[in-house]
Amino acid sequence: MSVIYILLTISIIVAIVFFIAFILAVKNGQYDDSYTPSVRMLFDDELIKEKSNKSILTKKE
């Protein structure tokens, strides 16, 4: 029974360490997306065309 307590304690400590590492990574900008904003301008024309096609279809009906 004492082994279960030891394993439970170790697993909680490991989980806390991983959680702290995740929080530090987020604060340091590890998961910031720096690629999408530079490519977004390439796809803006397609979004505008889709909106204009939808507005034309609704005017015809």
Image (cartoon, rainbow, N blue to C red):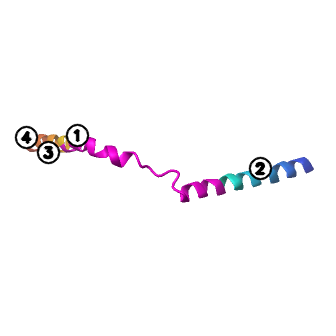
CA distance separating discs 4 and 3? 9 Å
Residue bearing the label numbered 1: 46
Which label's residue is closer to the chain start, 4 or 2? Answer: 2
Q: Nearer the viewer, residue 47 or 2?
A: 47
Nearest-to-viewer mark from 4 and 2: 2
Label number found at residue 55: 3
Q: Position of residue 40 (x, y in %)?
A: 31, 45
Question: Which element is circle 2 on?
Answer: helix
Label number found at residue 60: 4
Q: Residue shown at 51%/55% (left/top)?
A: 29
40 magenta-colored = yes
Q: Amino acid at mark 4?
A: Lys
Question: For residue 45, which quarter of the picture?
Answer: top left
Q: Is residue 1 visible?
A: no
CA distance separating discs 4 and 2? 64 Å
Which label's residue is closer to the chain start, 4 or 3? Answer: 3
Which label's residue is closer to the chain start, 1 or 2? Answer: 2
30 magenta-colored = yes
Magenta highlight range: 20-48
Image check: 53 left or right of 8? left
Q: Amino acid at mark 2?
A: Ser
Which label's residue is closer to the chain start, 2 or 3? Answer: 2
Image check: 57 left or right of 31? left
Q: Contact, CB < 8 Å: mark 4 with mark 3?
A: no
The vertical placement of 23 against 38, above or below, is below
Residue bearing the label numbered 2: 11
Q: Main secondary structure of the magenta part?
A: helix
Q: Position of residue 55 (x, y in %)?
A: 14, 45
